[in-house]
Amino acid sequence: MNYHIVKYSGPFGFIKPWTAVRDSETFSQQFLTPSIIEGIEKKLFPDLLNEDFHGKILKIKRHRLNYQGIDIQQERTWSKGGINIYKDKNQYKTNIGIINRGILINPNLYLAFENQSDAEIAMTQTVCLCRNEDLLFPEHQFMADEEILEKLDGFELLAATAETGFKVGHNRYNNAVEMFGELKIYGNPIRSRYEDDISYFGQKCS
């Protein structure tokens, strides 16, 4: 099969693990779950928001994620005890806590589509990985077959069952059913430099 692939890139990414609540330190997950892929797809193609398409990934056939490293950043949030507003020395204060997040640095995300028209639509939009502030921008579009796709470095989670994979969360688009996957690692998913080695990429479309 030939794929029409869109490459996205951005400065940061954070994929919250499904087991994390408000841990004092949380490292980004390094793969995309089926519900994340479905959420990205529905953002790119709003017509798929219809309930008839819930729990289905129809246009994104494959994907790949790589990044340059992980950096610890601090984020303010409400403490686990809930919101508590009090007055101290004529100042109103709240119980804000500080948590550490391991953020993906310079992530590259590749989305593979079967149809060129779908890739062209995706090429005109941004996606989030996965917080609203973690924008990834479309960089270029190219064609690749299965052989070339196998050479593209990165992580990819393939759908699996409870017997063949591990649990990766609950699908918010499909009645919170359990999701299972098999993690595939292609090449070296942690890049040593900002740019990918794109010498093996297929025909560049734009």
Image (cartoon, rainbow, N blue to C red):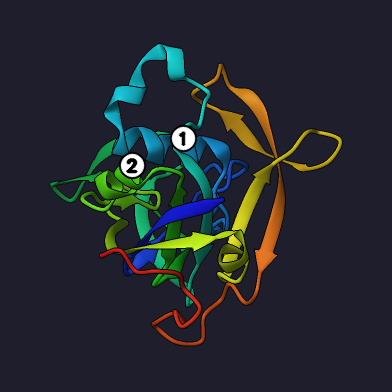
Please give the name of the residue rendered at 54% of the width and 42% of the height, measured from the top-left corner.
21
User: Taking 92 as reference, is 200 left or right?
Assistant: right
Q: Is residue 92 left or right of residue 123?
A: left
- 32 vs 197: above or below: above
Foreground residue among 106 and 88: 106
SS label for mark 2? helix
Q: Which numbered dot is residue 90? A: none
Residue 194: x and y in percent read: 39, 83
The C terminus - image quarter: bottom left
Q: Amino acid at mark 1?
A: Glu
72 above or below 25?
below
**Which residue is pictured at 56% across the width and 76% down the height?**
190
Which residue is tagged 2?
Answer: 118
Looking at the image, tell me whether mark 2 or mark 1 is earlier in sequence order. 1
Indicate the position of residue 86 as horizontal and vertical percent values. 26, 38
From this viewpoint, is residue 2 visible?
Answer: yes
